[in-house]
Amino acid sequence: MKRTDGRAADEMRPVKMCRRFQRYAAGSCLIEFGATKVICAATVENTVPKFLKGTGTGWIAAEYSLLPASTKTRTPREAAHGKQTGRTQEIQRLIGRTLRSVTDLRALGERTVHIDCDVLQADGGTRTAAITGAFVALVEACNTFYVPGGVFPVKDFLAAVSVGIDEHGTALLDLCYEEDSAAVADVNVVMTGAGDFAEIQGTGEQHPFSREKLTELLALAEQGIDALISYEKDVLGGQLVWKVGRVG
């Protein structure tokens, strides 16, 4: 079947990743999933949260925000209200913990890598785009302090994509906003280059869905993530790709 934007059910939106998008970040990436655009930046600080001081272990912290004009109706800056929404907190925790899942925190040393994801334009899949772009920024940032012959802090590749079921029962890959808002089921999937799951977030929006449908959705997500990781490797280039997972 053809979708609202003409794609096949198993077809992703056009994906673009632009490295070194920001001058002052240790690593950065402008990522686009169709009309969704997110700036992901990584900054390195030679300090860690109090609970890690003296342990020789580092940390990855993430922040996420929608810029005011990123949605059809203006989204006020949360700082103006002095409080983050539950959605924002949930998404930035997701970004942080999935990136930590493929990072050797001891290899970071007592450093914190701050990941900032700012949504320039939202058309569905902002969290999955943020995770994928943030991974590229993280690899760049870790390369700024990596000592040749040592353990590279990033152990494996990581990417994320959304999948869902439409009102006709069709499984769809990489939902845009219109599809996401009308979906019967919506699942966000984060996977590693080794094919392991870092996180699965799934909801039956209108009614429960079967195990068979979940299996179909996960297979579709794996297809999309394989393509994203292949693109990450192209964007990072041979100079960085070979370092991911390197232990000496």
Image (cartoon, rainbow, N blue to C red):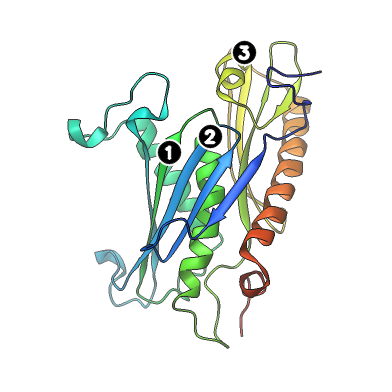
- Hey, which quadrant is residue 236 in on the image? bottom right
Instruction: Identify the residue position indicated by label 2 in the image.
Output: 36
Which sits earlier in the primary sequence, circle 3 or circle 1?
1
Discs 2, 1 touching: Cβ within 8 Å: yes
Q: Distance between the residues labelled 3 and 1?
A: 30 Å
Above/below status of 182 relative to 35: above
Tell me the element at label 2.
strand
Callout in the foreground (3, 2): 2
Q: Which residue is drawn at 55% across and 23% down?
A: 177
Q: Residues within 10 Å of mark 3 (few under 14, many from 20)?
A: few
Image point (61%, 71%), residue name: 240
Q: Pinpoint residue 113: horizontal percent, then vertical percent.
A: 39, 63
The quarter of the picture where residue 52 lies is bottom left
- Neighbourhood count class around disc 2 (C-alpha, 10 Å): few under 14, some 14–19, many 20 upward: many
Q: Do callouts 3 and 2 mark residues in contact (Cβ within 8 Å)?
A: no
Q: Is residue 3 left or right of residue 108?
A: right
Nearest to the observer: residue 133 or residue 56: 133
Q: Name the residue under label 1.
A: 119
Residue type, label 3: His
Residue 242 on image: x %, y %:
67, 74
**Residue type at tag 2:** Thr
